[in-house]
Amino acid sequence: MPALEAAAAPAVEVERPANPAFGDLATNLAMKLARPLRRPPLEIAEALAASLRDGPASAPDLVAAAEVARPGFLNLRVADAAYEAVVARILADPAGWGRIPAVNPRRVNVEFVSANPTGPLTVGNARGAFVGDLLCRVLEAGGQAVTREYYFNDSGTQIDHLGASVAAVRRREPVPDDGYKGAYVEQLAREVPDDVWAAAFEPGAGTSAVLGAWASRRVRGMIEASLARLGVHFDVWKSEASLHEEGWVDRAVERLRATGTVYEQDGATWFRSTAYGDDKDRVIYRSDGRPTYFAADIGYVTEKFSRGFDHLIYVWGVDHHGTVARNRNAAQAMGYDPDHYQVILIGWVRFVVDGVEVSMSKRAGTFVTLDDLLDAVGADAARWFFASRATHVEIDFDIELARKQSSENPVYYVQYAHARIASILRKAAEAGLAPAPDVAGLLAGEPEAALVRVVARLPEVVEDAVLAEETQGVTAYATELATQFHAFYRDARVIDAATPERSAQRLALALATKVTLAKALALLGISAPESM
């Protein structure tokens, strides 16, 4: 077989055949090599198979069989010794199982949720909490340094509207049409301290602004408590007001001015976004001097990169799609690599109870809060339902299904498998049986062979999740592993005092499965109960 220049070598693609009869792994490498080597794919595949079986590249501890299939596929069967080594590694170092080499190591800032502090966190806003937290966990699993950040829009008209609403309720007047309603506004009105109320009505104080500032701080506390209950934490809480106060907006505008992309027209200050493909230029400062949200956005980009991040990720609702281009354009104009400004847009969520959609409006006071959702289904079920869907798709969240404690509920099904293994291990200990340190010779049995092949895939699943920045593959894997364990337990007698050596090895395989399930659940931020 002629040698091949490194530059001409194709990427090696390995996949798992849908039909296990074709082996554990398959590659189309021979077909990719056919043109550069000027040889038939079958001939190349035969040469590769022979090398794996008998040649200097043979690896009997890794490959049990290498078979060729038309038109040039190479199917591989992994040796039992390789799977035995995986189980031994899990048992020897359970904490290290599932870790993978760093994938594209970076210092990443992930900003998510960032709901305005004008009301409790609704389930509509909350999808960003789930998506952002899951993304951060996945990136960290890939060896990236992640900073979680929440951005508060704590200045502007919406805060004034909140303050005006609190004032109206406190004085038992109608809430303004552009105000906020609901039980939380009534609670805020009752809790306004006397000194804050007095300060709001001092001459020139600005009643709405004073009360809005106080109320937004209280709402922020409510939001933080809800997120903590979900198990979501943030390293940085950043306010919009601070970007103006600390001069970051001015720095960003001056940076743009230096590039010639800022101009004045009709009394307003504009960014020439059309120079970067946008459909129109964007206002930074209005004609009355007030900054736009875009002004804060560009100041925020500068402030974040000044902290030494390599990559910025924003998790936004799909309704923010129009904002993406202008911000990326401004980042590019300021000299930042636009590829390091990433926006993930998340699809809408419909919450359904008894087949009926729950309508939500923060201004009207008709909404379901994150706390309501957690009260109804718990954090684990809520996390699972969001983790199992691609971030960009619209989803229906069936609250009744999430409440069920049965195999119909997928998170319950997976957690039950973990708890079941814990129970088996406890019963084995009571019978004087303990897991063996390895499973050498055990994998000839079909139940054991099928289970270990799923267990061994965890690092691959983690790597795929890191590269895709998605978690639905993890939930699918956890479900598959739970299903395979239940089948194993059905077909193989694990606790059998008459065959203590085989029982000890089956217990070892069960323990490796338990560790693997716990790792998959931890990547999703979901608990792995010892009993249910």
Image (cartoon, helix red, strand yellow):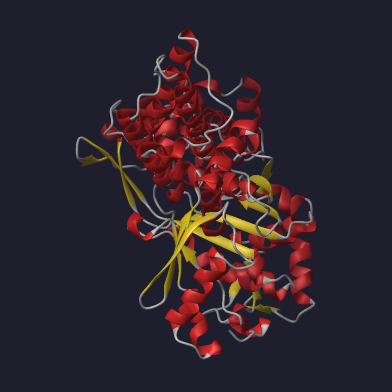
Name above or below for residue 522 compared with residue 260. above
The residue nearer to you, when weighing 101 against 160, is 101
Q: Position of residue 409 (x, y in %)?
A: 31, 33
Q: Position of residue 383 (x, y in %)?
A: 44, 38
- Is 341 situated left or right of 484 in this image? right
x 68%, y 53%: residue: 102
Name above or below for residue 33 compared with residue 480. below
Q: Check the image and name the residue furthest to the bottom.
A: 38
x 53%, y 64%: residue: 53
Q: Which picture quadrant has residue 451?
A: top left
Q: Position of residue 432 (x, y in %)?
A: 50, 10
Name above or below for residue 490 compared with residue 81. above
The residue nearer to you, when weighing 66 against 453, is 66
The residue nearer to you, when weighing 220 against 394, is 394
The residue nearer to you, when weighing 394 against 460, is 460
Name above or below for residue 133 compared with residue 372. below
Which quadrant is home to the N terminus?
A: bottom right
How many numbered tags mark residues here? 0
Q: Position of residue 32 (x, y in %)?
A: 49, 80
Is residue 206 in view from this perspective? yes
Which quadrant is home to the C terminus?
A: top left
- Is 229 situated left or right of 354 in this image? right
Q: Check the image and name the residue furthest to the front.
A: 54
x 64%, y 46%: residue: 140
Is residue 290 in view from this perspective? no
- Is 257 situated left or right of 126 in this image? right
